[in-house]
Image: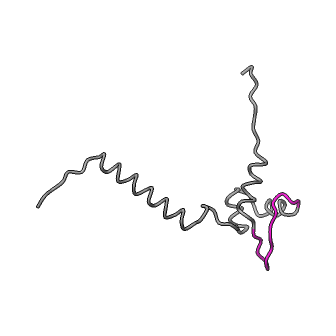
Amino acid sequence: MATSIITTDDLREFKIELLNDIKKILFKQSGTGLKKYLKSSEVMDLLSISAGTLQNFRMNGTIPHTKMGNINFYEADEIQKIMIENRVQIKLSEDL
């Protein structure tokens, strides 16, 4: 019976291949990586906001939504777009 020696480089290469395979599987299952529509609880978790804040965002038109029955749905792409549009960049003065 032949034995083979496994080196740390072999293990590292195996780990990288395994992680890449897992990423491919997860990406195929989720499509674009995010669900197309999110429920209120998912948006609150994603943005780390309360139910009241989310309601205020709906009422003042900050976050568009679709209501079906008693459930509000939000487009994931729309949430990302809003986050990008409202990004705050701080310019440091040259004196610092």
Examine the image and state in which quarter residue 82 appears. Answer: bottom right
Based on the picture, tell me whether residue 63 belongs to the magenta stretch: yes
Q: Quadrant of the C terminus?
A: top right
Residue sitting nearer the eye, 77 or 51: 77
**Outermost residue to the right:** 60
Residue at 73 percent across and 67 percent down: it is: 40
Indicate left or right for 48 with 17 as reference.
Answer: right
The image position of residue 15, as x and y in percent, is: 38, 53
**Outermost residue to the bottom:** 69
Based on the picture, tell me whether residue 66 belongs to the magenta stretch: yes
Q: Quadrant of the N terminus?
A: bottom left
The image position of residue 69, as x and y in percent, is: 79, 80
Examine the image and state in which quarter residue 43 appears. Answer: bottom right
Indicate left or right for 39 with 56 as reference.
Answer: left
The image position of residue 21, as x and y in percent, is: 44, 60
Highlighted magenta segment, given as a residue range: 60-73
**Outermost residue to the left:** 1
Residue sitting nearer the eye, 53 or 36: 36
Rendered image coloring scheme: one colour
Residue 74, compared with residue 95, is above or below; it is: below
**Outermost residue to the top:** 95
Indicate left or right for 38 with 11 as reference.
Answer: right
Examine the image and state in which quarter residue 61 appears. Answer: bottom right
Residue at 68 percent across and 65 percent down: it is: 42
How many numbered discs sit on the rendered protein? 0
Residue at 26 percent across and 47 percent down: it is: 7
The image position of residue 22, as x and y in percent, is: 46, 61
Indicate left or right for 34 with 23 as reference.
Answer: right
